[in-house]
Amino acid sequence: MLAEMTSAQFAEWMAYAQLEPWGEERADLRAGIIASTMANSMRSKKGKPFKPQDFMARFEPESEEAAVARMLAKTRAALGGK
């Protein structure tokens, strides 16, 4: 499919991924939301509220080139490309 996709279609998929992310990053956010909700339901009123990011793994920042390559790989995999 990726071999037959136009650059305009590919750009649209990249824009869509920015609006509606999928994959591991999105799954980590979902898990962080659940964990922060549970933790906030049990904290004291004086305690600082937890944020989803408090429960998400932190990785070293990646270069812009690496981010683009990662996004391309995810998009290819999502669209059944090689």
Image (cartoon, rainbow, N blue to C red):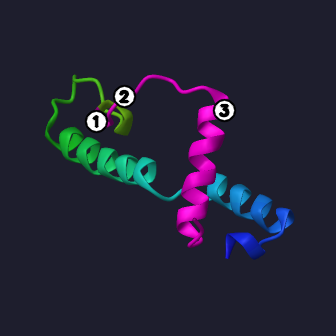
Amino acid type shown at disc 1? Phe
Work out whether 30 lies above or below 2: above
Work out whether 2 lies above or below 40: below
Q: CA distance from mark 1 to mark 2?
A: 9 Å
Which of the image's four quarters has the C terminus?
bottom right
Q: Position of residue 19 (x, y in %)?
A: 65, 56
Which of the 4 quarters of the picture holds residue 12? bottom right
Which of the 4 quarters of the picture holds residue 42? top left
- Judge whether residue 35 is colored magenta: no
Circle 3 SS class:
helix
Q: Which residue is mark 2?
A: 58
Please provide the residue range marked out in magenta.
Answer: 55-82
Amino acid type shown at disc 3? Glu
Do tag 3 and tag 2 residues touch (Cβ < 8 Å)? no
Q: Which residue is mark 1?
A: 55
Relative to 76, is 11 on the left or the right?
right
Q: CA distance from mark 3 to mark 2?
A: 19 Å
- Judge whether residue 73 is colored magenta: yes
Q: Position of residue 2 (x, y in %)?
A: 69, 70
Q: Residues within 10 Å of mark 3 (few under 14, many from 20)?
A: few
Along the line of sight, which residue is nearer the eye, 3 or 5?
A: 3
In front: label 1 or label 2? 2
Along the line of sight, which residue is nearer the eye, 45 or 57?
A: 57
Amino acid type shown at disc 2? Arg
Q: Which residue is mark 3?
A: 65
Circle 2 SS class:
loop
